[in-house]
Amino acid sequence: MRTVDAGQCSTKFLWGCVIVAMLAGAAGAQKKEDAVGPHASMQPARPAGSTSDFALVDGDPLFKGMKYRLIGPFRGGRSLTVAGIPGDPTTYFFGATAGGVWKSTDGANTWTPLFDKEKVSAIGSVAVATSDPNILYVGTGEAIRGNISHGNGIYKSLDGGKTWKNVGLRDSRAIGKVIINPKNCDVVFVAAFGHPYGPNTERGVFRTIDGGKSWEKVLYKDDMSGAIDVAFDPRNPNILFASLWQAQRLPWGFSDGGPGSGLYRSVDGGSTTIAI
C-alpha cells in the first residue's frame, strides 16, 4: 500500500485552487470584453439624456450640426405620418399607429391629443390643406405590419382638428397615404391598402373632387393588391405618381410581391393612369 504525505496533499490542493481561480478570472475578463467591445474603454460614456447623433458627416455641410432629440409626446406610441403648415414653424400634426392624432402649436414643446373621442386610434396618414390649414384629412389604419390595428376610413376636420367627421372608405381598413391638392382643398387622393389579412375590393387609389362627399376609384388592380403611396409632382398637381403593392399579412407569416405590384403615373389629375 502506498503512503501519501498529508502536508504534500494540502500543498497540491492549494495550488490547484489558485490555478482554477486564475483561469476563472481570465475567462470572466474575456467575456466582459466580448460584451462591451475591445475598444470600449476608449469610448467616453454618453451622459444620461444626451441627444442621439445622426449628423450627416459626408453629406450637405448644412446638416453637420443637426442632432435629433426626443420632443414627445411620451405616450403617443409609434408614428409614421407627420404634417406641418407652410410658413408656420410652430404648428405640427402627427398620427400615431395606435394613439390617434396629436397637435402642437408651440414648435413641438407640448402636444395635445385630438382623436380620443373617435372609434379608432390607428392612424396611417395625416394631411393638412395648404390652401386652408384648418382643413385636415386623416386616413385611419396603418398600411401593413406584424402587429397592426385596422381603421375605418377617412376623417375630415374643418376646425384644425377640434372636431372630426368620417367621410367614407370605411372598408379600406388600412391607408398608406392621403394627399390634398395644394390649390384646391376639395380635391383629395387616398392610397388605400385594403384589408391586410385578406382580399377586398375597397383598395387602390381613390379621388374626391367634392371634399369627401363622394369617392371615385381611379386606380385598381385586383382584390389582393393595395395602394401604398401616392404623390403629386411638386411643380404640377395634375401629375401624380402612385404605387400598388401586392402583399398580405398571414397569422404565421407575411407574403408580398407579385404581378399586382407596380408604379403608375397620371398626367390628367388621376383620371387616367399608365404603368411605368
Image: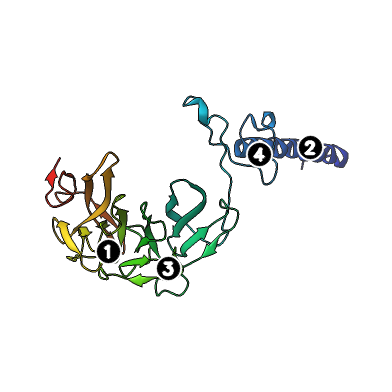
Left or right: where does residue 276 sit relative to residue 100?
left
Q: Residue 256: which numbered mark, if any?
A: none
Q: Disc 3 or disc 1, which is closer to the eye?
A: 1
**Residue in the image at 48% along x and 67% along y:** 114
The crowding category of the residue bearing disc 1, from other C-alpha atoms within 10 Å (few below 14, some 14 to 19, many at least 20), is some
Q: Which label's residue is closer to the chain start, 4 or 2?
A: 2
Residue at the spot x=54%, y=56% of the render?
Answer: 105
Residue at the image point whose x is 58% and y is 45% from the top: 69
Q: Are marks 3 and 1 in contact (CB under 8 Å)?
A: no
Q: Residues within 10 Å of mark 2 (few under 14, many from 20)?
A: few
User: Which corner quadrant holds the N terminus?
Assistant: top right
Residue 6 appears at what percent x and percent y? 86, 42
| SS of the residue under disc 4 | helix
Q: Amino acid at mark 2?
A: Val
Residue count near mark 4 (Cα–Cα under 10 Å), binned few <14, some 14–19, many ≥20: few
Residue that numbered label 3 is attached to: 121
Tag of residue 18? 2
Q: CA distance from mark 4 to mark 1?
A: 62 Å
Of the image marks 3 and 2, the number of the one nearer the N terminus = 2
Q: Earlier in the sequence, mark 1 or mark 2?
A: 2
Residue type highlighted by circle 1: Gly
Q: Which residue is mark 4?
A: 32
Query: Closer to the camera, 60 or 99?
Result: 60
Q: CA distance from mark 1 to mark 2?
A: 83 Å
